[in-house]
Amino acid sequence: MKSDIALSGALNFLNLGDLLQLFGSNGSTGVLRITSPYAPEPGVVHLLKGNPVNAFTGDETGLKALYALFGWVEGEFEFTPKEVPTEKAIEKGRMELILDGLRMLDDGEIQLIGPSERPDASQRDAPSAGGGPLIRGPLIDYMYVVDEEEFSAGQEIVKENSHGNWIWVVVQGLVQVRKETDRGPLELIRVAEGCFIGSMATFTVNGNVRSATSVALEDVSLGVLDTQRLFTDFSALSPTLRSLLLSLDKRLREVSDRILDIHKRAYSLDEYVKDREATIRQGNPEERLFRITEGDATVVRYTDDGHVPLAKLKKGDFFGSVPFFDIGQEPAAASVFASETMQFETVDIGPLQQEYDNLPATFKKLIEHTATCISVTSMVAADYHKESLKEKG
């Protein structure tokens, strides 16, 4: 391996989706170079703090080039940490890119560069396979693991609405996260190695009520995290960062509840947009972060199938752009609608960024996992919205 190359390997071991999740969870900046015996020239992806910002293959650049590279199922990859241009040719969030790319590959919308046989989605454990989108995490830091627990296929790990303060990291196996309904379980996402089961609400005085059920889809090994050590890390944070993280946790609960509302058709779009002003419009550039000081707001995504409600925000919640993680909502992929009484203040990102950069690795990974789950469940909400329209006929 060349001295400047940090990671290299075969695409049939780590495909592009796996690589983007790996580099994303580690916040890597650099150049991913992909070669294939079936392509005359290499493909290149520029990553900035874990997010793809541009891609190149043949005559294609940007989003088209990135999606095309999902079709390279045989070949080699090399990642070199280095500075890349900060101008973004790709605006979509990382998880949305991964899930869309793999779905398009499964649906035959992306040309397969390699063997004539298209790989079966179930065999390669694609996110589009049944049971909800699949999220993988970074390499596990065993510094915070104090014990291991085993769960058999089909066994419940946590039950929705139960109380519990344990946080686990998935060491091996596959776990489904779902909401309970009168018509049976509603699938949200699947999580695999390196992902967390548990919530930052564990660190609050009132404790944690589980917002969803987690079930082992196969035999699963979980690492029990040292929650006292995590609580110490959380307590040492500035009040602003603590509030931001708890707001992030609430945002995940909100979008999960919206999925349930969409499934039950128990919502009205007027509740989210009527007599409200768009403080942030989806797709418009916005680099500031805000905190609500009075009133409330709603988060709504516009799709080809109409508007999808994602969250309700209240006093103390944050909205806008957070440069050190991507929740897949505003400003790029959702709008924020303010009530007439809403007031807000601008939050200074600089000190938060510095404080976040100095966090212990495991604590940072827990935060990033929460942000990733918000991004993916937002996509799931849009999918359920589309399905509900089809059922209406």
Image: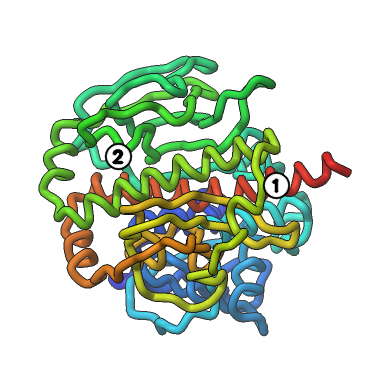
Q: Quick check: 280 left or right of 64?
A: left
Residue 383 x/y as whole percent: 68, 47
Name which of mark 1 and mark 2 comes first in the sequence.
Answer: 2
> Quadrant where the N terminus lies?
bottom left
Residue type at tag 2 = Met
Residue 143 numbered tag: none
For mark 1, give the secondary structure.
helix
Q: Can residue 51 be spotted in the picture?
A: yes
Residue 285 x/y as whole percent: 48, 78
List the residue tagged with mark 2.
Answer: 200
Q: Are marks 1 and 2 in contact (CB under 8 Å)?
A: no
List the residue tagged with mark 1.
Answer: 385
Q: Quick check: 133 left or right of 145?
A: right
Please report the residue visible at 64 percent of the width from the left and 57 percent of the height from the top: 100
For mark 2, give the secondary structure.
helix
Residue 121 x/y as whole percent: 68, 42
Residue 165 x/y as whole percent: 28, 26
